[in-house]
Amino acid sequence: MNLNFDPKDLGYLAPYLIMTVSGLLLVLAEAFYKGKDRTALVGLAVAGSVASAIASIILYTQVGPNVSQQIMGEMLMYDRTSYVLSALFALTTAVAALMSPSHQREHQWVIGEYYGTMLMAASGMIMLAHAANLVTVFLGIETMSIGVYVMTAMRRTSRRGNEAAMKYFLIGAFATGFLVYGMALLYGAAGTTSIVAMRGTLASTANPGLVIAGGFLLVVAFGFKVAAVPFHMWAPDAYEGAPTPVTAFMAAAVKAAAIAAMIRVFGVALGGDVVPFGALGWASPLVVIAAITITIGNISAVRQDNIKRMLAYSSISHAGVLLTGICALGLGSITANPAIVYYLIAYNVTTMGAFAVVAYVGSRGRERLLVDDWAGLAGQHPAAALAMTICLLSLGGMPPTGGFFGKFYIFKAAMDVNDGQLLWLVLVGVVNSAISIYYYLRIVTAMYFREANQPFTPTRSGALVFVMAMCPVLILEMGIMPGWWLKLV
Amino acid sequence: MNDIFWNVGYPHYLVLAAILFLIGTVGVLVRRNALIILMSVELMLNAANMTVLIFARMWGDLSGHTFALMVIAVAAAEAAVGLAIVVAVFRGRRNVDVDRLTTLRH
Amino acid sequence: MRIIALIVMGLLAFGTVGGAVAYAADPPSAVPTAGAERAGKQVNIVKTTPHMDRRESRPSSDNPGTALLFWAFAAATIGGALFVITRRNLIAAVMGMVGSFLGISAVYMMLYAGFLSVVQMLVYAGAIMVLFVFVVMILNRPEDEPVAPSGRAGQALGGIAIVYLVGRLILLLINVRPPRAETAIAAPGPITLNVPGGAPEKVEWGSVKAVGTDLFGPGLFPFEAISILLLVAVVGAIAIARPLHASDEEGTS
């Protein structure tokens, strides 16, 4: 019996292995750590994540532009996309870890298992970036989700935290049911769980109905995971109730990892010339979901007074744009893959930056999440206000930022689909970008043109300031020189 | 009718799994107790797992059995975390009714 | 209460005995017993991948026992599941769940997934349900409101949509065509494993050996990676559910 295992394959999995081993070390370190201040573990967490990112970047340079290789008994694969995404997930994890200790200290929820859980959740994300089989897609999603449920519940003294965790968990588990059932139906149609083999067998299956039903169930399941609109009701509550660094991790990395899984499932397994099309192919429900996600996300964001909820609805509408990209990818647009990867990078950087400012403004048990709390911020803390402004402009898709080019490339990829099928979706997206500027500018005007209520001391943390400085610089870099980022994959 | 009763084939098993999935879904939507919702989710996972095994038998492909084993392990892990969250919520408010989780509603 | 207990006990006994009967009624034989002709045919087939050889399919009206067992286990499965979503009493719901799981386990046995059937019984009916019972006991409030109050328009709409979709799904599933024409589910033949440095070995389809060969062959990576998931779950469950001031009481650990 051939074991289908080559020790050389482990080398290609270095990012995953480094992340996993760091997570295990953190769990051990927490068990044997004697000191009172458990936030010191953050050093190991950041080192592990950064090492994993460096490994991804080194391996990325070893892989040619059009190489795609399956490893570990065809359970995993590697190509440039998977290494770019695993580097992105690792760096986002490092940033989320950097944001955490000061927040834990200020809001008194110091808990040692936090960093180990975070790194192991990140290892699930890296698995998703490499997944080439429905089994690994499922495992990656579950490792990530279970880790994030736990992280959401870790602020245990807060009733809101518990409530957010419960809602997030129940909805996530419900989505898992749909995910497994959809995968089961696809397996029934294809007779294999390998994503790459599936692409060939699905086109000539004897049971096309199973493909349609399975695709639809997977759209629902991933809709829950990325918070697309009929399935988004958990997101604002979970984002608001979770501690801010966890919210940032959920909004940026978890969403990006779910999209990475969608790139594989919908772009490879269900992509091509036959499967997505037709009156009942998966593309038609996904296009509708993308359109209403962009619209409802924006309209709901306009009404929010709480900044975390506003950012939650904003991330919902961003999920709609990403789903537009996934539609374009499945329908065979060649430019869709680099566009989605560019958008994910820009979106992750922006989201981490925005939540870093939110974490910076809240201090000593007060989170200061209402727009009124932010009035006059520019007078007291001009640097924080500037960083937030740049992040909000990028979220709104204003020109000199990464967010603008992200939206631009995704819509351009959608236009490349045959016969302009996605033209109306692009129009919906563009109109919504204009609407979204209103509520982003509302915060900017509050920060710059309103009188301050009372002065306050923000969170003192060098790491947080570092994140707040780096993210806007990266956003502007991506916006001014987008070409290099676009050529990554 | 006679034939449907005596001649049990793949469709019978598949429909059994689909009905089980439906019951699980309805349970999640209708019941308000977090524990029952968690049990209904387990029913959904079992229905999906049964479908995997039916198709594994249909294709004569053992990789479906590996998949099903993974799903069982994940379901166990999910149940453990879910019950821990239920206990944590119960500690704070002495009930686990999802309709009373209203601190976050605006 | 006593009636519920009786029903549950009945389901339990039914599932356990039934699983064994289903297996005994139609075992997937490693050594074919159905005649020398067929046995000769199977010996000639040597496969390298763990796919099964098929016996000639036969209509199961030849074997009415199979049909009766299927309907019995289907009733146990569905009945237990309905019990879960209709009972007010949490313990009763858990017991209905156990009955449902035992029915599912027997159905797995009828699908010739012997190993998975045993795992289902041990992990689900054994371990997970015990966990549920413990939590029900911790909460110590077995009664709770049974169904949602009326007037939830959105929920009703969602329910109707889901019933409609599952109806469509069932129509679809009725017409599923197997890759090869089979009128009924016949016992799968044995699969042949190539043993390094030895004669090829025949093992039962769905047995521990057959599943293990796949699990430690192509499935090696998920098998190893799932340990991380289980670790996250264990560490996380402890971190969330331990008493709030444990760190103060425990001292250094």
Image (tube, helix red, strand yellow):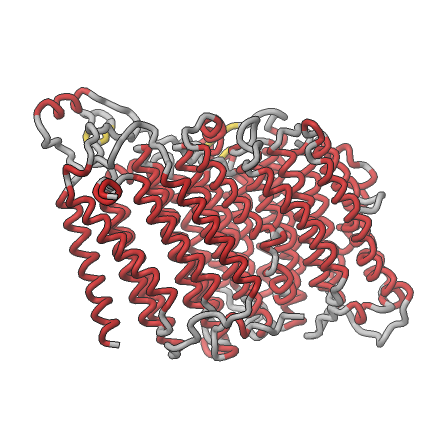
The residue furthest left is C36
Horizontal arrangement in the rendering, residue C49 relative to residue A40 (left or right) = left
Q: Is residue A134 visible?
A: yes
Horizontal arrangement in the rendering, residue A187 relative to residue A403 (left or right) = left
Question: Residue C120: horizontal and vertical position, in percent?
Answer: 29, 53
The residue sitting at 29% across, 31% down in the picture is: C50
- Answer above or below: position of B97 versus B57: below
Q: Quadrant of residue A425?
A: top right
- Answer above or below: position of C52 versus B65: above
**Image quarter (top left, top right, bottom left or bottom right) of the C terminus of chain A:** top right
Q: In this orientation, which residue lies closer to the viewer: B4 or C116?
A: B4
Q: Quadrant of residue A383?
A: bottom right
Question: Residue A91: horizontal and vertical position, in percent?
Answer: 64, 47
The residue sitting at 42% across, 36% down in the picture is: A193
Horizontal arrangement in the rendering, residue A41 relative to residue A355 (left or right) = left
The residue furthest top is C44
The residue sitting at 74% across, 39% down in the picture is: A426
Question: Residue C173: horizontal and vertical position, in percent?
Answer: 38, 41
Q: Is residue B76 visible?
A: no
- Answer above or below: position of C98 versus A480: below
Q: In this orientation, which residue lies closer to the viewer: A107 or C47?
A: C47
Q: How many marks?
A: 0
The residue furthest front is B1
Q: In this orientation, which residue lies closer to the viewer: C174 or C242?
A: C174
Q: Quadrant of residue A36?
A: bottom right
Question: Residue A363: horizontal and vertical position, in percent?
Answer: 72, 71
**Image quarter (top left, top right, bottom left or bottom right) of the N terminus of chain A:** top left
The residue sitting at 25% across, 40% down in the picture is: C206
